[in-house]
Amino acid sequence: MHANFINGEWIEGVDIRVNISPSDLSDVIGDYSQADAVQAAQAIGAANAAADAWARSTGQQRADMLDFVGTEILARKQELGRLLSREEGKTLADGIGEVSRAGAIFKYFAGEAIRIQGEKLPVMRPGIEADVTREPVGVVGIISPWNFPIAIPAWKIAPALAYGNTVVFKPADLVPGCAWELAEIISRAGFAPGVFNLVMGRGSVVGQAILDHKQVDAISFTGSVTTGRRVAESAIKRLAKVQMEMGGKNPLVVLDDADLQTAVDCAIQGAFFQTGQRCTASSRLIVQKGIYPRFLDAMKARMQQLTVDNALKPGVEIGPVVDETQLNQNERYISIAKEEGARLVLGGERLERDTEGYYFSPALFADCHNDMRIAREEVFGPVAAMIAVDSYEDALAVANDTEFGLSAGICTSSLKYASHFKRNSQVGMVMVNCATAGVDYHVPFGGRKGSSYGPREQGRYAAEFYTTVKTSYTAV
């Protein structure tokens, strides 16, 4: 039994969740405790009790503990990467890569813990000095999604602890394995009881308890738009600080002057790898008419070569989708797109493999327009819609015509168009001649419109959420 971690102790929950691999439904990863609202409240109480002492800890103390966590994650990246691929379904190479990123994030914020900056500003009145300092927010509730079961928790937990906050962490119910292993490493890093707490369980129970509790000072959430609205309502109602990363309907623009192979590589990687289960996936391929036929043929040829199979098999490019619910959602959008008049070029079917799992062939639709649901709603699967446009100006207008604004890409050999697109794309992240999915751990992550709310994540920009600014005056 994998228990919850509350106030420095491993405590069994009120129920059990059996963690099963989407690659092989006979592969039982383990039994994981499910907390209830009472245990969530206990974890919050413990975090609150530990907050003052932890806020007064030195940067070196925090750095040493975070470095311990990062070092062990990296040392165990093969083992943890395999666990990640078993429970989430992304390929073994991607699983190991994600674990490596998580380790690097902890090491990065170990450094940031001793680089917390302030300012001394001149004052307009003689004989008075002003200091601007950053202080921890307090108790941070962290609610993470299933598609990056260790990287996203890492980029939330590491800065929260680095800046002197205490943490109550609720991972996605679908993928408790990586969260538990991460918590187990943190439990041995030297943190005082209550500084870090793990409460696994349903979002409607444990997550809601975190949202509603008056002792939770800030909430960092990544998940769906629907759930995000509920998070925002609960947090704002009691004036808690809130940071949210939600959906995306990301465009990849392909202009007539693009290198065809580069454009295809960007589209295939962005739209279909990691089974399209990324908020930064290229789900809209906006292609200028001059290159459209060649691009479509090249996409179809490359898609026919893609290997979809058990995530742990060598050479597999795409694993299964995460569960039956997501598989059904993919199929539902395939039907919706056909009904709206989109032409299915390839894919969009359940697949059978040697092991029973949730396998789905990547789907490409042609002859789409931007008003179709397939072009406006996030499928969160390996499904891409191709939209033909006459010019760069048309492409930019279509790319920006969405309620989301996370990531956008353009494939072109024109510096003029690349520069204009970077300036005028209404998103938080722009990629030129590279896939819309995939960012470094030391740069800010986030979007605009319905994709994000609140300060950016990752890098030094994380301080905007995990700290509060204080101005102090001293008469000298």
Image (spheres, rainbow, N blue to C red):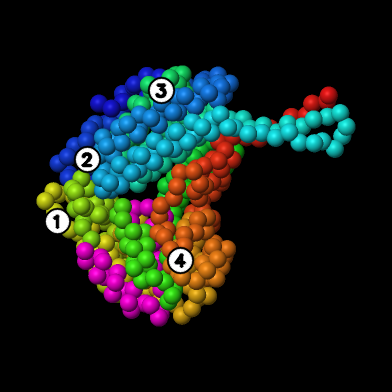
Q: Secondary structure at mark 1?
A: loop
Residue 448: horizontal and vertical position, in percent? 54, 55
Give the foreground label among 4 and 2.
4
Rendered view: 217 above or below 87:
above
Dot 4 corresponds to which residue?
Answer: 410
Q: Tag 2: Cα neighbours inside 10 Å, few (<14), some, or many (≥20)?
A: many
At 25% from the left edge and 39% from the top edge, which residue is drawn?
82
Name the residue carrying label 2. Answer: 20
Determine if the magenta segment contains residue 293: yes
Which residue is drawn at the image coordinates 49% and 64% (left, top)?
Answer: 402
**Badge 1 amino acid:** Glu
Decide which of tag 4 and tag 2 comes sooner along the chain.
2
Disc 3 crowd, CA 10 A, few/some/many (<14, 14-19, 20+): some
Q: Which circle's residue, 1 or 4, is located before the other in the chain?
A: 1
* Residue receiving disc 3: 189
How far apart are the alpha carbons under marks 4 and 3? Answer: 43 Å
Q: Earlier in the sequence, mark 3 or mark 1?
A: 3
Query: Disc 4 on helix, strand or loop?
Result: strand
How far apart are the two marked residues, 3 and 1, measured between alpha carbons? 44 Å
Verify CB contact (< 8 Å) between mark 2 and mark 1. no
Badge 2 or badge 3: first in the primary sequence: 2
Disc nearest the viewer among 2 and 3: 3
